[in-house]
Image (cartoon, rainbow, N blue to C red):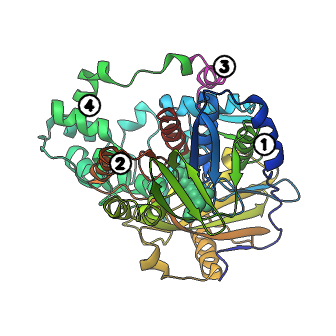
Amino acid sequence: MPESVFFDYADVNKLHRADPFRQRKQASLILPLLMTKSVAVLGGGIGGLAAAHYLGRFGCCSRVVVVEGTHRLGGWVSSTTHHDQVVFEHGPRTLRVVGNAGMNTLALAEELGLADQVRGISYGHPSAKNRMLMVGGKLHKLPNSVKALFTKSPPFSKPLALSGVRDLMAPKVVNNDESLFSFVNRRFGHEAAKYGIDPMSRGIFAGNARELSVNCIARRLRDVEQKHGSVFLGMFKDRKNAVKPDKKLSSNELVKRAKREKWVVWSVAGGLENFVKALENNVLENNTEIWKNMPVKGMLKSGGKFVIQTEEKELEVDNVISCLPSNIMSNVIQPVSPKLSTLLSSIPYVTVGIVNLEYPGQLIEEPGFGYLVPSSEPNRVLGVIYDTCTFPQGDRTILTVMMGGYWFKELFGDDPSLESLLDEALTEVRQSLKIKVKPTRYHVRILRDCIAQYVVGHSETVDSARKLISDMELPLALAGSSYDGVGVNDVIMSAKNAASGV
Ligand SMILES: Cc1cc2nc3c(=O)[nH]c(=O)nc-3n(C[C@H](O)[C@H](O)[C@H](O)COP(=O)(O)OP(=O)(O)OC[C@H]3O[C@@H](n4cnc5c(N)ncnc54)[C@H](O)[C@@H]3O)c2cc1C
């Protein structure tokens, strides 16, 4: 059964292919003798490509090979450009600016020559200000100003500022980890958990806040609570220990522009896949080899080296950076370390249904980023993103309906038809947004096992995996979205860290 269906137009993305002859010729001309290490980067998602880019930039290797299992690069970063240049995003659509990881991705965009194509969304923009919740069949704007925190804004029965007061009074509970829901419930009250962290977890992880780890996802909040007994008090008292902005990154021209223009999020003209294409071109220029359609089946240890096994050929290298999802890497690493394999296989994944819908005209009454649905509501979707409120594309409305995640099997079974998911999406927008007309174009996709779930204990799992690698003295680094953050910024940062360790 196909996992994706188009209503109208075929995908017209054309991917640049590697030219091994050109690569060998260039490599023989410019390789300094000191660069002796060969590195295999497993997986050609944004993580793998970023790792290859940084290996090239750090100039430590004689040979870098990205081994990708499919015919295309980018993994979950996937945009379709239709014949009339209208873009649908099937995976990530906006990247955050905040923090060193956010600045790092902007700096990378500039390095790749994308500065002119970056599109920033500032604080005052409706899609930055208006984030909504669907509760009781109605849309509610989340409080977005100091004043709004002190007034009662449904679905919250009391002003949200009272949650802060509760945090100052609630006793701390000493523990190593707990669920996000339990932490927020304990510190800020049940409504903050039910209408705050629950839908947010569905929006970011397509996951269940009752299972996701606070230690991993909101570690600083948990740490200051454990140290000072209150999140607010702790954040104030501990402000000197907050991560400092990296000076080099802060001085990047695109970062400075983002700060000047108060961007909250950004994307690339023509879709985020253009970021992937720029990365691909860049790593090819740096003599990296890209093997497409070459799923890694396993790897073996041979002396101090690794042998990467694919169906067609083998590759012997000094170092490996794995940017494969942990559930795939678990199988690949089995012959080298069954124990590491077991640890990696314990990280769960969820499947998400994505429906892109396009309508003529402007159909959204209250512009915003979109809305999320708390898990306590009967709606059968995780949320709806108003794509064209953030990045308009002429006189049309484009929405993306996200569904399933942690609840995919319970709601839709193992193998729902794409038509049934389309029906679910159309029902949702008909009931919630009163959109009764038929879409002019749509696209439905099932993204199997697309988001790793950082459940309670995730940090210990990742630490144990890395300790095992170090104890066994394996020249292997784990990077990508399975370990240190699922956002694109975190993935790129993890790839940079892995490359700097080679
Ligand atoms: C629907 C959705 C929406 C999202 N929205 C956002 C957002 O708005 N903002 C944001 O910052 N993040 C978002 N994310 C998260 C972000 O997109 C991902 O975490 C990130 O793209 C993962 O990159 P990766 O390289 O780690 O992994 P992947 O994208 O999973 O790449 C892994 C690569 O490995 C390849 N591979 C698999 N098996 C093998 C094998 N055996 N051999 C060789 N290659 C193999 C795959 O084909 C793939 O190319 C979203 C994710 C999803 C799914």
Look at 30% across and 18% down and name the residue there.
240
- Cβ atoms at labels 1 and 2 below 8 Å apart: no
Q: Quadrant of the N terminus?
A: bottom right
Tags 4 and 3 in contact by the CB under 8 Å rule?
A: no
Please tell me how crowded label 3 is: few (under 14), some (14-19), or many (20+) other residues with Cα within 10 Å. some
The residue that label 1 is drawn on is 23
Q: For the residue labelled by badge 2, is the local secondary structure a helix, a strand or a loop?
A: helix
Q: CA distance from mark 2 to mark 4?
A: 38 Å
- Is residue 477 rendered magenta in the image? no
Viewed as shown, does residue 412 lie left or right of 468?
right
Q: Is 255 a magenta residue?
A: yes
- How would you rate the neighbour count of disc 4 (Cα within 10 Å): few for under 14, some for 14-19, many for 20 or more? some
- Residue most toward the right? 83
- The magenta segment is 250-265
Q: Residue at x 37, y 56 (%)?
A: 198
- Badge 2 amino acid: Ile
The kind of residue on which mark 1 rests is Gln
Q: Find disc 4 in the rendering and name its residue.
A: 232
Answer with the quadrant where ligand 1 appears in the image: bottom right
Residue plotted at (30% across, 22% down) = 241
Task: Compare residues 44 and 166 and report the one nearer the observer.
Answer: 44
Q: Is residue 330 visible?
A: yes
Kindly state the secondary structure of the residue where label 1 is placed.
helix
Three-letter code, disc 4: Phe
Residue 307: x percent and y percent? 53, 56
Q: Which residue is mark 2?
A: 469
Among the two numbered marks 4 and 3 on one chain, the one whose residue lies closer to the N terminus: 4
